[in-house]
Image (cartoon, grey):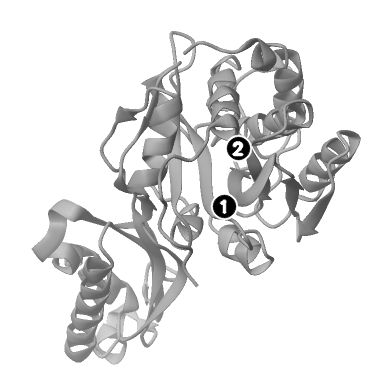
Amino acid sequence: MEISAEVEELFGTLVSTRRALHAMPELSECEFKTGDYIAARLKSLGIRCRRVHTGVIADIKGEESGRTVGYRADIDGLPVKEKTGLDFAAAENMHACGHDGHTAMLLTFAQLLTERRPLYNARLIFQFGEEGTGGAEKMIEGGALDGVDEIYAFHLCPELEKGRFASASGPLFAGTVEFDVIFSGVSAHCAVKERGRDALAAAAEFVSRLGEMNAAFRSNTLVHVGRLDAGTARNIVADRATAYCTFRFFDTAHMEAGMMNAERILGEITAATGVGHEIAVRTVYDPLIVDGTALRRVRDVAAIEECPPRYTSEDFSAYCKRVPGCLVWLGTKDENYTAPLHSDKFGFDERALLGGVEIYYRLSRARNAYVLAPRKK
């Protein structure tokens, strides 16, 4: 896409910002230095901001005060040991999901708005805790969406060629339930195993029957056990086992039916083995539903390709549940960068970020020609 002179002039700032952020990745709920850095940058631009835990919220007044448009970036890193060889790589943790790029785009956009006032009020949301701790809900509880009429965000995409953008109306990311199944048995020596109740065997039975959870709607859901912990010694009947599970869905009814199926299967296993069970739900994200009208707004200012939904999850869904919103995939794939998200070798050409800043800038200047759905209470 064509990059305006105003955005191109800030490329050096965009690069230095991204690299500073990349060098300080912090895990969810612990983004203290990152939050301080963002707040200091905004203050240096004359933009007042406030904190929600480690997150940051800033408002910039528009030429017309009738609407407020939200723009969101996530700021946390991952517990990944970086192997990119970059001279600004961090010693611990890593921005392996592109959040340094998301935040750099939004900070650069903030600078642009101090020079080119937006048409409508702009709410800049720098969100903590996207990687598994439900930071979006906590930001919303802290007032991030108060008065916001619509909201937009980007996510870097290493499967999409650099310079291309993609989204779709309706489900774009799956909802997810992260849950553990804890099995409680009775320990015994294997020589007299009949005196015990084998939690490991019960867990293995559950894993073998996992497909029953979503058998009726398998084409639209995904269920997976990624870890199984059990036992203390090779000759001892395990009295405890834990299966770490994820269930991905695009329809809440399928999620509810799937979890009920899990409970049915576990009840049958308990009846057959005498091993007790408990389901502990750790995290629930709704599917990310892109509002069709919000997507039209983005398509009015840039070429946005159509793409299928993915089983990855994103807690931007919490914002889209409350106000019309649109997340856009921003392509980063080229001959030098092909590593997937969450990889220890993930990286990107920083010029790809210019397209995101450009779209934000165009949105900030575009008059809203559509009636968006009312805000949800």
Give above or below for 259 relative to 139.
below
Residue that extends furthest to the left in the rendered view of this protein = 216
Going 70% across and 41% down the picture, which residue do you hit?
62
The picture places residue 276, in percent across and down from the top left corner, at: 33, 88
> Number of callouts in the render?
2
Going 28% across and 33% down the picture, which residue do you hit?
307
Give how far apart the Cα atoms at labels 1 and 2 are: 9 Å
Q: Quadrant of residue 269?
A: bottom left
The picture places residue 28, in percent across and down from the top left corner, at: 65, 53
Q: Is residue 340 visible?
A: no
Q: What kind of residue is marked 1?
A: Glu
Q: Quadrant of residue 255?
A: bottom left
The front one of 191 and 194 is 194
The picture places residue 156, in percent across and down from the top left corner, at: 49, 31
Q: Is residue 12 visible?
A: yes
C-beta proximity under 8 Å, tags 1 and 2? yes
